[in-house]
Amino acid sequence: MTLSATTNWIDALVVQTAPSVLVTVAMVEGSTPRETGAKMLVTADGQFDTIGGGHLELRACETARAMLASSDDSIMTRRLERFALGPSLGQCCGGVMHLAFERIETAVLREFEYMRARMHKGQDSWRLTPLESDGTSSVHDHDGHCLSGRPQTVLFDPARPCHVVRDASGLRWLIDPCLAHRSHLVLFGAGHVGAAIVRALADLPCHVTWVDERDAMFPHTLPANVTVEATDTPEAVVGAAPPRSSFLVMTHNHALDLRLSESILQRTDMGWFGLIGSITKRMQFEHRLLQRGISQERLAGMICPIGLTDIHGKEPAVIAASVAAQLLQVWEAAALSNPGIAVTSSIEKI
């Protein structure tokens, strides 16, 4: 079996040509390796993403490949199975995971392509899928309006993560959010460290706007979560960034770094601001920014040097790993203090 370097299931799904089965963690009880909504895509000889690894993942792949190999037209394209991690699989977690299996058909693929496009536009979607029939699935917005497929009468709570409900007739439905990344980084600078940070963030739940005036500095192939802005007026990108965006400045020009820092610190709705450099650079910038009217209170929000304090390596890949970890800390703290969607959910007894 080959394990692709592509780890994001939805990006893999839209480019796959081989038959595949999507495996979704539909419900959990107790301690489990992944949360509800976690997914992996399984083909006859490969897989993308993970639902937790170990014996569970092996069994899930076996089930998915049996569905792919079956020539029996009476076999349903969807199923929901319960896996007790401790007693039957010997995994230390000891909880229970309910996995939804779905063979990907052409109509279904179009739904995921549509949701992926919405996600990259910053729009949330909810997919409603019948688990005990081959009936039609559908895509809805936050208010329950049907965007794709046949409208359903199943009610769902958009504040909940992936879960299973019963309809009026007693049939079970998978309510599966496909949410736009809340975390947004505006990265100024396409040098070695900037490129390393983009690579480090490629598979993380965030969107990156990568800014530089030198168009030739950007690589030909970009991660799916990255948008390039080749512009001679980077300060305009600061003003156009969404509220609570994170900013990271590491251009090739200290004068430009200073102008960008001033523009960022003038925003009262920024989420985080990091500036590459030493303690000496910070002192110089603080002095000049104070002269330009930036208050000491605002300057306290400027992170310089960047990265975790216990990591001292200067190699681009080391800096990138340290900064990526720092950003994850910031973004997870922000999500917990202002949750748009619950991170975990207890099982609904159905």
Image (cartoon, rainbow, N blue to C red):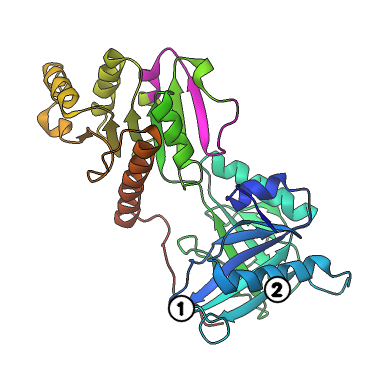
**Camera-nearest residue between 267 and 99:** 99
Q: Which residue is mark 1?
A: 92
Residue drawn at the location 72% of the way across and 75% of the way down: 132
Q: Residue at x 61, y 41 (%)?
A: 117
| Vertical position of residue 14 compared to residue 46: above or below | above
Residue toward you, 134 or 142: 134
Q: Which residues are magenta?
A: 220-237
Does 166 appear above or below 186? Answer: below
Q: Which mark is residue 79?
A: 2
Q: Report the mark closest to the observer, 2 or 1.
A: 1
**Front in this rendered view, residue 229 or 33:** 33
For residue 182, side relative to residue 246 (left or right): right
Q: Quadrant of the C terminus?
A: bottom right
Choose top left, top right, bottom left or bottom right for residue 340: bottom left
Q: Residue 265 appears in which quarter of the rendering?
A: top left
The disc, 2 or 1, on the residue closer to the chain's N-terminal end is: 2
Q: Residue at x 70, y 59 (%)?
A: 1
Q: Is residue 298 left or right of residue 158?
A: left
Q: Magenta segment: does it hold 11?
A: no
- Of the residues shown, which amino acid type is indicated by label 2? Arg
* Position in image of residue 80 (x %, y %): 66, 75
Q: Position of residue 204 (x, y in %)?
A: 47, 47
Q: Is residue 164 visible?
A: no
- Identify the secondary structure beneath mark 1: loop
Placement of 87 over or under 279, stated as above or below: below
Q: Residues within 10 Å of mark 2 (few under 14, many from 20)?
A: some
Task: Indicate left or right for 348 with 277 as reference.
Answer: right
Query: Between marks 2 and 1, how big is the CA–CA gap?
Result: 26 Å
Residue 289: give x, y in percent of width and height: 16, 20
Tag 1: residue type? Answer: Cys
Q: Residue at x 47, y 73 (%)?
A: 32
Mark 1: few, some, or many residues within 10 Å (few <14, many ≥20)? few
